[in-house]
Image: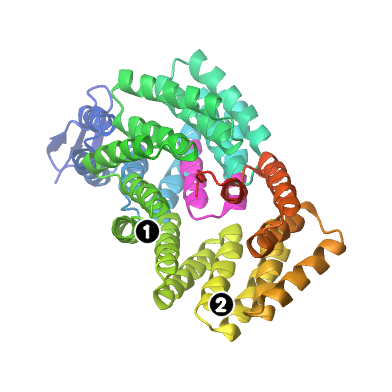
Amino acid sequence: MSNHRYHINKLWLEAGGQYYAYSVCLSKADVLELSGEWQQAEELFRKNLEFAKLAGAQSQTADSQIKLFRIMRYMGKANDPMALLNEALAIYTGLGDQPGISQAINNLGLVYAAQGKHQKAEECFNDLIARSKRFGDSKHLISGLGNFSQVHISRGRFDQALECLEQCAEASLRENDSLFLSITYGTMGNVYFFQDRLDRSYEYYKKQLDLARRLGDPANQSIAVGNMGNIFYRQGKYQEAVDCYRAKLEISQKLDYKTGISQSCGNLGIVYAEQEQYQTALEYFERQLKISEEAGDPEGREGGCCGLGMVYAKTGEYGRSREYFLKAVEIDLEAGFDRELDSNYLQLAEVCFKAGDKTGALDHLEKAKLSAQKNKNEDILAKAQILGIKIAAGNDLSRTEKMFLEILNKQPGNILEALVCYELCGITGDKDQKTRAIGLLQELYDQTFDHDYKRMKTELEGTKDDRQG
């Protein structure tokens, strides 16, 4: 067998007398990835990796590992992503390849973010941004800023997210990086969506969709059309929302993009549950859970379990509801989904209460309070206090009313006062309390954009609820 050699001028790899057009195949795989032919792209990336290792070409081995990891992550197949990334990082470090090191750090940050390890993700992206500025690496500066914005969003730091994204958009335009500009537009749309600035949000989702279409980029088309569906759903335009979610599902299925399939199914489940089409909602949530388990996606699994728990609670199947909320709690604890944990403990308490299991209700209620106190979640603390009164009073409405009035006499904060007035309206029908509740719920919605408050407000006003869910 001949010695392994790499002929850089010919852009071929040689091993054991065999030659492989590495660079040509790499370019072809990149085009296949962009055009949505992910299965074919994965096969080529694997061939590239195999031959690069056989040829003893370290740089090409690391490059292939990064690209293979990326396509596997898109397809939900990266069961042990750290192995590929750490091996690539070790090779780049040994070679002193600074752009390669930055590429590996960026992908490590994405893995940590997907796992809910936000502090570790933040450390990676901070390191990436600093390195990119030090070495004048515009490509990875754009990636670092864009991905760091996602961490800010996950932690509710929307102003910091927009600062990152504005820098990212400027750099993308300067470098003529249309693909990342499309992604940046979508993320800016997300920030405005979370701030309930829906016209601005739609504007940026439309920019993302138009640019993705011009680029022939089905992955970002899928993301944009799905996000436009979220806006329609929030506005109560359910048919338009369903059309968007189905379009996203169709594109995601063609790509075999498991995260996109999971998101589409979850959103369709929510819309159908909102319209009391519970059987259809169950089918979509079951599919979301199945595809997320295949992809190793904790966020999708948690969403599927919560959706199933919610629908079974609405149909009075409290045993099955409790089963799925318990699974959601288990995922929350594993993935560090703190705010979801608060909510799911409270959901469990409510399900147990409705099922007549007072002991279980009190147990989960206490866990909800402890978790909410740790996370400073005032909304869940207030809702937990309301449920505690209902559990204590049982079916005695006069006692329930008395306990709620005692809270009002203590001049509680706005959240608790709004919830108490809302509950009292259902007992007494008092017009003054109704007016007060509507005003407070509107204030809370304006401050938090929490559509549970909007749902309660519109319910009191006798109009159709259009909460996001």
Q: Secondary structure at mark 1?
A: loop
Q: Quadrant of residue 248?
A: top left
Residue pointed to by mark 2: 353
Question: Where is residue 311 drawn, in percent x and y?
Answer: 40, 63
By secondary structure, the bulk of the magenta-drawn segment is best described as helix
User: Badge 2: few (under 14), some or many (20 or more) residues near its Cα, within 10 Å?
Assistant: many
Residue at 27% across, 46% down: 53
**Count of numbered circles in the view:** 2
Question: Where is residue 355 drawn, in percent x and y?
Answer: 49, 79
- Against 452, residue 42 (above or below) is above
- Against 127, residue 320 (above or below) is below
- Start-end of magenta stretch: 102-123
Question: Where is residue 85 drawn, in percent x and y?
Answer: 42, 49
Residue at 21% across, 36% down: 37
Q: Secondary structure at mark 2?
A: helix
Question: Where is residue 219 drawn, in percent x and y?
Answer: 33, 34
Front-most of residues 304 and 458: 458
Determine whether, in the image, residue 439 is placed left or right of residue 22: right
Front-most of residues 284 and 8: 284
- Against 30, residue 277 (above or below) is below
Residue contact between numbered discs 2 and 1, judged by CB atoms under 8 Å: no
- Against 343, residue 50 (above or below) is above
Residue pointed to by mark 1: 296
Front-most of residues 185 and 317: 317
